[in-house]
């Protein structure tokens, strides 16, 4: 089976590493000449709107999936004429737009911070008055890793903020005094079977994920599964979806969803019986899902900007390096490490060991 | 770091799957147009004696390693002029020739079946008289998966047997009434540090490995490590080496060594903290070795001739498929499955489930 992937970055690379042992081949459509997934499959170098190359991809593969959600709707619609596409156009339409996303949460009774659509500075002024400050102004589309957003702490911050974000459609979200950030990675098969990985505690710095720690018997696991299940079923979703929540007052408020494999699920490569990458491929290929059970205690640390010397990373006991083969650049995710061990105290000590390498 | 691999079959493929996350790139020199490792790296399609292409490989990579031991000595000598080669020419010289191999075992005080060099039918007649029957006649080089050998059960089998194996240099080995076959996979770093995986029980059918089960606290583990350590140190070996033993009268008799990653070590991909493939690469690249500790109870079943339907293999709980992407052909290893679970009873039940798929 040949899988087409829109995007050829590290998520595509890790999909190919998981899928090759299943007997799958891969083609990646990505305009970047140095797309790092090309080491593991065919690289169709083209823009996401290039219909000739999209058609070539569709003709070569058995199905198409995505590495990121900001794919133009036209691209998805075009591909869908020729080849099965998972997740669906509708799931991508919702997930790539914060307004549609939050509106879906609201429709499904999933708590989420107060929010308002902002199409102009006048909209923003009204929304800020209604929701109150502090609040966060975010572009409806194309935001990631803290990009495309601005925290409005006081009234002076509101003036001109819409123009600062490019005068594009935005959403204003009430600021949530959260005690933690967690994510739930889930996978849903074509037949509707759904499995959930354990909740993950995430630590972001400057909007970029730095550390994910898989939980054991988290008291909010069942609640999170309930919320995520509502979204998956509503969208008749196929594949892996990650759902980020704020922990607030002992409950959860929905932040956002990502309709794809997710950075906070990278620990599953070693830390779960079947990784998010393999499970995504199983789901889209119509295969039975794999177990989402944990194997020991696990954490994932991102390498941002550069990877510490390889000999130092692998010298940490039971540390698994994932180097993306990308050029080092400030703020860019260029690798990660998974730690897996028997108990939490050992895990914490090793997290500190890897953090020390990152800071060195 | 770019790694050159002589051979581009499934072992090269699994080396690349393990090395890509370490930031390594791969080039495979293999004459086969359909060498299955080519999905994961550059394929230099050339004969193993083609000096122009060997030189190209040497110029492109940081070091060269091997996927199989039957590489011509001239190839190794030629490459060694230009690039580091691991394991060494001397290790390959010994391991690819059963006479040198057995002689080394004898020199190092490692018990091994009685053996004699056979360069002619007259040699064979004399050796059969001295060693007695039953005995096994094997070509000194190029044998694998039961090929290049013949069991001599009675006197009538001896006549003409030398010609039957092609009138090439052979070795006659006394038949050993073994109670089991075990192998020890070891890895030795450039600095001499050595680590051993747990002993593995192997079941061969028709000379081809069918099932490997990793042991827990095997009573012969220490003895096996002693024997293997002697060989590794004597050869100043760098990389993974597999050592096959017969279990005889509660002790071990050396059968053969393979100076490479080995089929009986495939379970380590999921079943050990750091796989034989990653540890081989760590060793040859001069990186610290990874842990050889088991993660749960594990077994590996080979898929010979064909891979059962993928949806059936992955439906077995906690079953990890490794499809080599090779054309199906009788007697050919085309994939394997690793089972990993918490206890031996569950493991045994799942082994039976996969065996049922193979026999279906």
Image (cartoon, coloured by chain):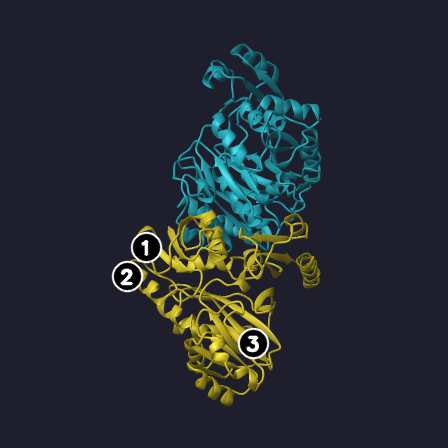
Chain colours: A yellow, B cyan
Q: Residue shown at 51%/41% (left/top)?
A: B26
> Which residue is rendered at x = 41% and y = 40% of the image?
B326
Q: Residue at x 52, y 83 (%)?
A: A158
Dots 2, 1 in contact, CB < 8 A: yes
Q: Are marks 3 and 2 on the same chain?
A: yes
- Look at the numbered discs 3 and 2 and tell me whether their residues touch, using CB distance below 8 Å: no
Per the image, the residue denoted by label 2 is A81
As drawn, the residue found furthest toward the top would be B122
Q: Is residue A221 left or right of residue A1?
A: right
Pointer 2 chain: A
| Same-chain check, marks 2 and 1 | yes
Mark identifier at residue B110: none
The circle drawn on residue A246 is 3
User: Which element carries disc 3, helix, strand or loop?
Assistant: strand
- Report the Cα–Cα distance between label 3 and label 1: 39 Å
User: In the image, is residue B29 above or below residue B114?
Assistant: below
At label 3, counting other C-alpha atoms closer than 10 Å, the crowd grade (few under 14, some 14-19, many 20 or more) is: many
Q: Give the x, y percent position of residue B338.
A: 52, 48
Give me the chain letter of mark 3.
A
Q: How crowded is the residue under tag 1: few (<14 C-alpha within 10 Å), some, or many (20+)? A: many
Numbered mark located on residue A58 in the image: 1
Front in this rendered view, residue B334 or B8:
B8
């Amino acid at each position: 089976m040949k899988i087409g992937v829109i995007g050829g970055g590290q998520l595509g690379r890790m999909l190919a590493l998981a899928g090759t042992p299943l007997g799958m081949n891969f083609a990646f459509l990505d305009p970047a000449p140095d797309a790092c997934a090309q080491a593991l499959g065919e690289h169709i170098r083209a823009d996401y709107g290039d219909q000739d190359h999209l058609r070539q991809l569709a003709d070569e593969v058995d199905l198409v999936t995505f590495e990121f959600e900001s794919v133009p709707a036209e691209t998805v619609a075009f591909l869908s004429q020729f080849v099965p596409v998972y997740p669906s156009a509708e799931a991508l339409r919702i997930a790539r737009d914060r307004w549609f996303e939050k509106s879906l949460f609201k429709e499904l009774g999933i708590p989420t911070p107060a929010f308002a659509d902002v199409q102009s500075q006048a909209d923003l002024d009204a929304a800020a008055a209604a929701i109150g400050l502090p609040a966060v102004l975010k572009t409806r589309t194309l935001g990631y890793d803290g990009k495309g957003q601005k925290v409005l702490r006081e009234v002076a911050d509101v003036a001109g903020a819409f123009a600062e974000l490019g005068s594009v459609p935005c959403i204003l979200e009430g600021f949530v005094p959260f005690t933690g950030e967690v994510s739930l990675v889930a996978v849903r098969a074509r037949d509707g079977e759904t499995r959930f990985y354990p909740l993950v505690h995430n630590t972001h710095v400057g909007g970029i994920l730095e550390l994910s720690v898989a939980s054991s018997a988290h008291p909010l696991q069942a609640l999170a599964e309930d919320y995520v299940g509502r979204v998956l079923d509503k969208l008749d979703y196929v594949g892996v979806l990650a759902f980020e929540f704020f922990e607030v007052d002992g409950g959860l408020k929905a932040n956002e969803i990502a309709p794809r494999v997710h950075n906070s699920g990278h620990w599953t490569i070693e830390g779960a019986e079947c990784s998010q990458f393999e499970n995504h491929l199983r789901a889209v290929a119509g295969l039975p899902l794999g177990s989402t059970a944990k194997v020991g205690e696990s954490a994932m640390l991102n390498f941002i900007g550069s990877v510490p010397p390889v000999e130092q990373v692998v010298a940490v006991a039971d540390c698994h390096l994932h180097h993306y083969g990308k050029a080092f650049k400030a703020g860019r995710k260029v690798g990660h490490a998974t730690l897996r061990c028997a108990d939490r105290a050992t895990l914490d000590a090793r997290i500190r060991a890897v953090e020390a390498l990152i800071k060195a």
